[in-house]
Structures are given as structure tokens and as C-alpha cells.
Amino acid sequence: MKQILKLFLNVFNKESYIVGGALRDILLNRPLTDIDIAVPNTADLEKKLKFIAKKKSLSFFPLDKKEKTYRMILKKPFIIQMDISAIKEKSIIADLKARDFTINSMAYPLTETIKLSFKAVKRGMEKTKKGTSLKIKGLRIKKVIDPTNGIKDLKNKKIIFSNPAKAIKDDPLRMLRAFRIASQLDFTIDGKSLSEIKKQSPKILKSSSERIHDELMLILKNPHSLTYIKSLFECGLLLTIFPDLKAQIECAEEYYGKGGVLKHTFKVIERMEYFFENADIIIPYYKEFPDFSHEKEILKMIALLHDVAKPPKAAFVKGRLRFFGHEEYGAIMSERIMKQLRFSNNHIKIAYSAIAHHLRVGNLASNNNISERAIFRFFRDMGDNAFYLLILCWADHSSYISLNQLSSIIEKIKQKPFFIGQKGLPKTGITKTLRFLQVVNLLFSTYIKKTLKLKESKLINGKDIMKTLKIKESPLIGRILNNISMLHFEGKIKTRKDAIDYLKKQKELES
């Protein structure tokens, strides 16, 4: 890596700099998975970069030829990504002043001595995709080129636009990026910058949907992202990106209090983050659960959108405010919103399923007796999406009581659902919430004890049925398979032999 950096100096006459977020993270002693380099804006810039890439066996491709930004990737003996940009202004100082935030508007000459160290790390969301974390030490603070006092703002943990009006005009996404960087570094955005964001928030829609999506997901990655979601709301960005949420503010205030449904939406996100922090206490058999650490962002997005259709479906029925059909219509609305923001088809399907069925667990919990067959049908219908739905339902139901109340019943939640009795459950309150959360936990434990294990141990298939019963392929096969799966779930059939014997018995009864 040192030889690559030296080659930059040789090719560009000793005028190359570590810049931007990379230098910021070095000064914060944070590991890097990539490094940003600024070089002179020469006519043959791309030719020079291709020469470096070829000389050091680096993959090379342009990111934006018009803006003269390029990427090189070192793959052996470790993976390091280098983003190279041309110095667009007359000097490096003028170039730095034109960047987004003061903490990103610094440069360090590669002519200065630095120390490099490397460590293997996971890159991206894939568990198996490994890269390298790079640490650069030995920087001399006095040699940092810092025309906008970025070092001072780093010490004060402040996000400040270098030139607010110009920065947002040049790239409106910087408004969202301010919150993303604040969430990653645990910094605050200064008042003047927040005022400028509030004034110019409508311009965020000039940014591409893909870029908005990526910044939002990085914000949601923060374990306490609700703080930043509320700030996005206060400065106008949230409702500009999600205009369908605006109607929630004054909807059902008599039920949810000031802020209406949107207040409830925020509360559900809060409870979901509480769930993620305390899952080992909340979920039975937690250690046996699938790893959902890489799905937290999409689950919080589902929480944000789960009641998006309450305002259009709100109506008074016999003097009581109801939202009939809001779950199905909300799934349709969420699908449209997520498509516009370029979410993956898989994430859209997960969200659609969870939102469309998010009242189902509550309906199940309202019954005095919850049969094995009712639980089987729930998991059969929800399939692989059951897990996402259960987390959403836990957050949704727990949002109706305070955190103190929730803490007081956390152990009772793990108990078998209590008997409701003839009077039924109260319409609101801790008793209703306890019963609902007990049912959610019952489904969680069933998911581990039965659903996952039974899924891995399918006893027979359609060919076995056709062979045993001597019948041709037809819809009847599916119905028989479903019936055997249900008996397996109930424990009435345990082995392949049991399943075959059951088929033979049914054949004898019919004959």
C-alpha cells in the first residue's frame, strides 16, 4: 500500500492528498475500509490513473467521468478501496472550501510520513464478504490543511456545512448525509446548518431515489435511529421524502394524543429498538433464533410505514374511531413508496407481507383458546416472513404502554397466555398488552421449537403420495400434504413411516 501511495506522488509531481471522510476518520482514530485521495486536475488524469492501476495490479473504473472521480481496488493480499477525485478549484485550499462539511474539508499531503496497519473485517451486509480495515497513524496535526476549522469541529463533535447554501445547491443529498454522518459519529448538527436544511428541505427530491435510499438505511442502522428520524421530521426532510406520513400528524389525536398516528409510529420504532437491545431477555430460545442483525434497518422501515394507511381509512363507526382495512391498503401504499425509493424486491415483499398481516397476531390473541391448528395455519400462511411480522407485532403491541410498565411485566410475557374469560379483554391497558405479548412470545417459541425444525424435516413429498395412493397429480396432493404437515406440527405424526401408514389408512377408509 505504501508503494501505491508513493507512486501517486511520483506520477502527480508530489501533489497528492488524503482527503474527506478518510482523513476525518483517521483523525478520529477510526479504521478505514477505503481511502480518499485528491490529485491535480490534469488533462491526462485518467491516463495517469490507469498507469498506476496497471503498475500495481489494481482494478480501475470511473465513478463519474464528468466530475472526474474514479475508483481503484487493491484485491491482494487484502482488499482496500481507493476513491480518487480531481482537485476542481485552482488550489487544494479552494477545493476544500467547496466541500460539504468542515470535518470533511481537510487534506493531508502524501509527502508526509504515515504509518499503515491492516486488519481483516467484514464488509457490507454479507456475513461471508470479508475485506480489510486500514489504520493510518503518525499524522502530524500541524501538517493537516484545514481551511474551515474542521479539526476544531471534530473536537466539538459538530456537523457544520462549509458553505450551507452552496453545499446544498451543489448536492441536495448533503442534507440527508449530515444526519447520516451525525448518526455514525454520534455528532450533532449545528443550529445554522439545521436552519438551512429546514429552509431547503424540498430540494432533497432532486437527489436520486437510490442515493436517498442508501442514506436512509445507513441512518436506520444506528441502534438509536429514532433520534435522527425525529430530527428529520423536525427539519422537514422526513415528510418531504414520505409525504404520505403527513396526514398521520392530526389523525386520531383523541386516541394517541398530540401528534396522532405519527406519534404512535415513532413509538413503535422506539419499541423495536428496545426489542433489538433486549432480545436475549425478551425472546424464548433467543440463541436458537436466526441472526436478524442484518435486517434491523428494513424492520425499522416497516415500522415507519406500518400504519401509513390509517388516515385514509379512518372512520367513526358507532361513535368509535376505526381503521378498517388499513393493513391491506397500507401494504399497497408501502409497496408504492418503497418502489419509488428503489428498495429491493425482496425487501418490498417482506414489508408488504408484514404490514398486510400486522393485525393478525392481535386477532389471534383475542381468542380465548389458541389451538395448535390456528398456530399451524399462521405459520403456513406467513411462511418465511413470519419472523419479521412477529417482531413488528411485538413492537406495535408494546408501544401502547410505558417503558416502566413494560419492564414490570417482562417476565410475565414469557408465561403461557392467561385465560381471558367470558368478559373478554379490555379495549386498552396493560392487561390487554400483556395478553397480546404473551401470544407473540408463544409464536416466537413455536417458531423455534416446531416451525424451523419441521421445515428442515419434511416427511414425505407429492411423489410419495401419488405412489402410495396410486393417484395422478392434482390439487388433491397439495391438500393431503398440508394435512400431513398439520398433523406433524401437532405431534400426531412424527416419522416418515407414520406418514405412509396414515396415507394407507386413509386409502383403506375410502375403499
Image: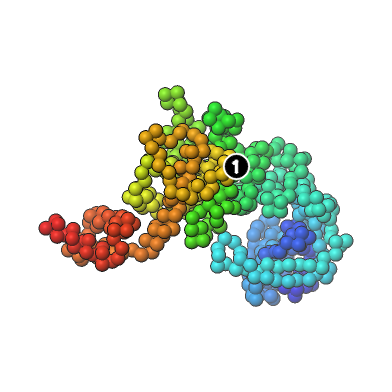
Position of residue 444 in the picture relative to residue 266 (left or right): left
The answer to whether residue 114 is visible is yes
Judging depth in this view, the residue of 284 and 132 nearest the camera is: 284
**Residue 360 at x, y = what percent?**
41, 43
Q: Return the residue at label 1.
A: 404
Name the outermost residue toward the right.
142
The correct choice, above or below, for 316 with respect to 510 in the image is above
Report the side of 43 relative to 220 (left or right): right
Nearer to us in this view, 199 or 353: 353
Amino acid type of the residue that numbered disc 1 sits on in the rendered structure: Asn
Is any atom of residue 203 visible in this view? no
Badge 1 density bin: few <14, some 14–19, many ≥20, Cα 10 Å: few
Residue occupying the point 59% across, 49% down:
273
Q: On screen, 432 above or below 342?
A: above
Q: Quadrant of residue 35?
A: bottom right
Identified at 73% across, 67% down, the residue is 135
Tell me the quadrant of the picture where the C terminus can be found: bottom left
The x and y percentages for residue 154 are 79, 53
**Residue that appears at 47% across and 28% down:** 321
- Tell me where residue 472 appears, x and y as whole percent: 19, 60
Label 1 SS: helix
Q: Quadrant of the N terminus?
A: bottom right
Q: Residue at x 48, y 38 (%)?
A: 431
Residue 426 relative to residue 470: left or right? right
Q: Nearer the viewer, residue 270 or 310?
A: 270
Give above or below for 221 relative to 434. Answer: below
Which residue is outermost to the top? 319
Give the x, y percent position of residue 61: 63, 65
